[in-house]
Image (cartoon, rainbow, N blue to C red):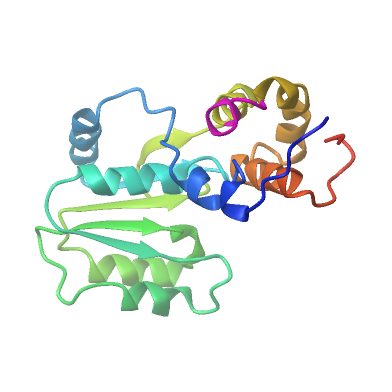
Protein backbone atom coordinates (compact mmCIF):
# COMPACT_ATOMS: atom_id res chain seq x y z
CA UNK A 1 0.00 0.00 0.00
CA UNK A 2 1.53 3.31 -1.07
CA UNK A 3 0.63 6.33 1.01
CA UNK A 4 1.67 9.96 0.74
CA UNK A 5 2.96 10.96 4.17
CA UNK A 6 1.49 14.27 5.43
CA UNK A 7 4.12 16.98 5.88
CA UNK A 8 2.61 18.06 9.24
CA UNK A 9 0.90 16.02 11.99
CA UNK A 10 -2.17 18.24 11.69
CA UNK A 11 -2.51 17.22 8.03
CA UNK A 12 -2.79 13.54 8.94
CA UNK A 13 -6.38 12.51 8.04
CA UNK A 14 -6.59 10.63 11.35
CA UNK A 15 -5.25 13.49 13.52
CA UNK A 16 -7.03 13.83 16.86
CA UNK A 17 -8.80 17.09 15.97
CA UNK A 18 -10.34 15.39 12.91
CA UNK A 19 -11.38 12.30 14.83
CA UNK A 20 -12.91 14.37 17.64
CA UNK A 21 -14.97 16.32 15.08
CA UNK A 22 -16.78 13.14 13.99
CA UNK A 23 -20.44 12.87 14.95
CA UNK A 24 -21.89 9.93 16.82
CA UNK A 25 -23.56 7.34 14.63
CA UNK A 26 -26.09 4.85 15.89
CA UNK A 27 -28.74 6.97 17.59
CA UNK A 28 -32.01 6.09 15.87
CA UNK A 29 -34.12 8.72 17.65
CA UNK A 30 -34.15 12.51 17.65
CA UNK A 31 -32.50 14.54 20.42
CA UNK A 32 -35.95 15.58 21.64
CA UNK A 33 -37.06 11.94 21.87
CA UNK A 34 -33.82 11.09 23.66
CA UNK A 35 -34.49 13.85 26.18
CA UNK A 36 -38.00 12.53 26.73
CA UNK A 37 -36.63 9.01 27.22
CA UNK A 38 -34.19 10.26 29.87
CA UNK A 39 -37.09 11.78 31.77
CA UNK A 40 -39.24 8.67 31.30
CA UNK A 41 -36.45 6.62 32.89
CA UNK A 42 -36.43 8.89 35.94
CA UNK A 43 -33.69 11.27 34.88
CA UNK A 44 -30.87 8.92 35.97
CA UNK A 45 -29.52 6.98 32.98
CA UNK A 46 -26.39 5.43 31.51
CA UNK A 47 -24.80 5.37 28.09
CA UNK A 48 -23.30 1.89 28.01
CA UNK A 49 -20.61 0.45 25.79
CA UNK A 50 -17.09 -0.92 25.50
CA UNK A 51 -14.03 1.29 25.13
CA UNK A 52 -13.93 3.15 21.83
CA UNK A 53 -17.60 2.59 21.05
CA UNK A 54 -18.62 6.26 20.95
CA UNK A 55 -19.91 6.86 24.49
CA UNK A 56 -17.93 10.06 25.02
CA UNK A 57 -18.86 11.39 21.59
CA UNK A 58 -22.55 10.80 22.28
CA UNK A 59 -22.27 12.37 25.74
CA UNK A 60 -20.60 15.49 24.31
CA UNK A 61 -23.30 15.91 21.68
CA UNK A 62 -25.98 15.36 24.29
CA UNK A 63 -24.38 18.17 26.31
CA UNK A 64 -25.08 20.57 23.44
CA UNK A 65 -28.70 19.47 23.13
CA UNK A 66 -30.03 19.34 26.70
CA UNK A 67 -31.58 22.55 28.05
CA UNK A 68 -30.54 24.31 31.23
CA UNK A 69 -27.13 24.45 32.91
CA UNK A 70 -25.02 21.35 32.31
CA UNK A 71 -22.07 20.21 34.43
CA UNK A 72 -19.69 17.75 32.76
CA UNK A 73 -17.56 15.56 35.02
CA UNK A 74 -14.67 13.68 33.39
CA UNK A 75 -12.86 10.83 35.15
CA UNK A 76 -9.92 9.21 33.37
CA UNK A 77 -8.92 5.60 33.89
CA UNK A 78 -5.42 6.57 34.99
CA UNK A 79 -6.68 8.89 37.74
CA UNK A 80 -5.46 7.67 41.15
CA UNK A 81 -8.19 9.61 42.98
CA UNK A 82 -11.33 9.41 40.81
CA UNK A 83 -13.81 10.53 43.48
CA UNK A 84 -11.73 13.56 44.38
CA UNK A 85 -11.51 14.46 40.70
CA UNK A 86 -15.26 14.07 40.24
CA UNK A 87 -16.04 16.03 43.38
CA UNK A 88 -13.85 18.97 42.36
CA UNK A 89 -15.69 19.33 39.07
CA UNK A 90 -19.10 19.78 40.69
CA UNK A 91 -20.62 23.12 41.52
CA UNK A 92 -21.78 23.69 45.06
CA UNK A 93 -24.67 23.50 45.37
CA UNK A 94 -26.11 21.35 42.58
CA UNK A 95 -29.67 22.53 41.99
CA UNK A 96 -32.81 21.12 40.42
CA UNK A 97 -32.05 23.00 37.19
CA UNK A 98 -28.74 21.21 36.60
CA UNK A 99 -28.00 18.28 34.34
CA UNK A 100 -24.92 16.28 35.36
CA UNK A 101 -22.96 14.39 32.69
CA UNK A 102 -20.35 11.93 33.98
CA UNK A 103 -17.80 10.51 31.55
CA UNK A 104 -16.02 7.51 33.05
CA UNK A 105 -18.39 6.71 35.92
CA UNK A 106 -17.09 3.14 36.10
CA UNK A 107 -13.90 4.55 37.67
CA UNK A 108 -15.85 5.22 40.89
CA UNK A 109 -16.12 2.32 43.29
CA UNK A 110 -19.45 1.36 44.83
CA UNK A 111 -19.05 3.55 47.91
CA UNK A 112 -17.70 6.52 45.95
CA UNK A 113 -20.55 6.19 43.46
CA UNK A 114 -23.17 6.27 46.24
CA UNK A 115 -21.47 9.30 47.81
CA UNK A 116 -21.35 11.03 44.44
CA UNK A 117 -25.05 10.36 43.84
CA UNK A 118 -25.88 11.86 47.23
CA UNK A 119 -24.09 15.06 46.19
CA UNK A 120 -26.05 15.39 42.94
CA UNK A 121 -29.43 14.05 44.08
CA UNK A 122 -31.08 17.44 43.51
CA UNK A 123 -30.04 17.53 39.85
CA UNK A 124 -32.74 17.43 37.21
CA UNK A 125 -30.89 14.74 35.26
CA UNK A 126 -27.75 12.61 35.47
CA UNK A 127 -26.31 10.83 32.45
CA UNK A 128 -23.20 8.67 32.94
CA UNK A 129 -21.03 6.58 30.64
CA UNK A 130 -20.39 3.02 31.80
CA UNK A 131 -18.68 0.01 30.27
CA UNK A 132 -21.36 -2.36 31.59
CA UNK A 133 -25.06 -1.96 32.46
CA UNK A 134 -26.30 -2.17 36.03
CA UNK A 135 -25.71 1.03 37.99
CA UNK A 136 -28.36 3.04 36.16
CA UNK A 137 -31.10 2.33 33.63
CA UNK A 138 -29.57 2.09 30.14
CA UNK A 139 -30.46 5.00 27.88
CA UNK A 140 -28.58 3.69 24.87
CA UNK A 141 -26.02 0.94 24.27
CA UNK A 142 -23.16 1.95 21.97
CA UNK A 143 -21.91 -0.80 19.67
CA UNK A 144 -19.43 -0.97 16.81
CA UNK A 145 -18.89 -3.09 13.72
CA UNK A 146 -16.49 -3.17 10.75
CA UNK A 147 -18.99 -1.29 8.58
CA UNK A 148 -18.91 1.62 11.04
CA UNK A 149 -15.12 1.72 10.88
CA UNK A 150 -15.27 1.74 7.06
CA UNK A 151 -17.78 4.59 7.15
CA UNK A 152 -15.55 6.68 9.41
CA UNK A 153 -12.45 5.98 7.32
CA UNK A 154 -14.29 7.06 4.16
CA UNK A 155 -15.22 10.32 5.85
CA UNK A 156 -11.77 11.02 7.27
CA UNK A 157 -9.70 9.88 4.29
CA UNK A 158 -11.96 9.60 1.25
CA UNK A 159 -9.09 9.46 -1.23
CA UNK A 160 -7.49 6.52 0.62
CA UNK A 161 -10.68 4.63 1.45
CA UNK A 162 -10.50 2.03 -1.35
CA UNK A 163 -6.88 1.09 -0.55
CA UNK A 164 -7.51 0.92 3.20
CA UNK A 165 -10.79 -0.98 3.19
CA UNK A 166 -9.32 -4.48 2.64
CA UNK A 167 -7.37 -4.10 5.91
CA UNK A 168 -10.16 -2.69 8.07
CA UNK A 169 -11.99 -5.88 9.02
CA UNK A 170 -8.78 -7.37 10.40
CA UNK A 171 -7.90 -4.08 12.11
CA UNK A 172 -11.33 -3.92 13.75
CA UNK A 173 -11.07 -7.43 15.18
CA UNK A 174 -7.49 -7.01 16.39
CA UNK A 175 -8.62 -4.05 18.45
CA UNK A 176 -11.73 -5.90 19.72
CA UNK A 177 -14.05 -3.35 18.12
CA UNK A 178 -12.39 -0.33 19.74
CA UNK A 179 -12.87 2.25 16.99
CA UNK A 180 -10.68 4.83 18.69
CA UNK A 181 -7.76 2.40 18.83
CA UNK A 182 -8.28 1.54 15.17
CA UNK A 183 -8.16 5.19 14.15
CA UNK A 184 -5.08 5.72 16.33
CA UNK A 185 -3.30 2.94 14.45
CA UNK A 186 -4.34 4.45 11.14
CA UNK A 187 -2.84 7.74 12.31
CA UNK A 188 0.44 5.88 12.88
CA UNK A 189 0.17 4.37 9.41
CA UNK A 190 -0.03 7.79 7.80
CA UNK A 191 2.69 9.13 10.08
CA UNK A 192 5.03 6.41 8.80
CA UNK A 193 5.47 4.64 12.13
CA UNK A 194 6.04 0.90 12.39
CA UNK A 195 2.79 -1.05 12.37
CA UNK A 196 1.58 -4.55 13.01
CA UNK A 197 2.17 -6.63 9.89
CA UNK A 198 -1.49 -6.89 8.98
CA UNK A 199 -1.48 -3.32 7.70
CA UNK A 200 0.98 -3.98 4.92
CA UNK A 201 2.73 -0.85 3.73
Q: Is residue 155 left or right of residue 63?
A: right
Out of 122 and 13, give the one closest to the viewer: 13
Q: Is residue 170 left or right of residue 23?
A: right
Residue 18 image offset from top left, x and y in percent = 50, 44
Out of 154 and 50, give the one closest to the viewer: 154
Residue 20 image offset from top left, x and y in percent = 47, 47
For image coordinates 15% across by 54% down, the residue present is 124
Out of 171 and 189, give the one closest to the viewer: 189
Answer whether residue 133 is visible to the viewer in this image: no
Instruction: Confirm whether the magenta stretch covers residue 156.
Output: yes
Residue at the right extreme? 197
For image coordinates 15% across by 58% down, the residue present is 69
Residue 132 image offset from top left, x and y in percent = 52, 46
For image coordinates 47% across by 73% down, the residue present is 82
For image coordinates 25% across by 69% down, the residue present is 118
| Stretch in magenta | 153-160
Residue 73, image quadrant: bottom left
Residue 172 image offset from top left, x and y in percent = 70, 33
Amino acid sequence: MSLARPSRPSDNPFASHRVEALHYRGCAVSWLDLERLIDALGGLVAIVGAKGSGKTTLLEELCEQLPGPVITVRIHGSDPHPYRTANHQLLDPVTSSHTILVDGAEQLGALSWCTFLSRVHRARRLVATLHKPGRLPTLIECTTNPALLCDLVRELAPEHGPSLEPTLDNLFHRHDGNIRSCLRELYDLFAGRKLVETLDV
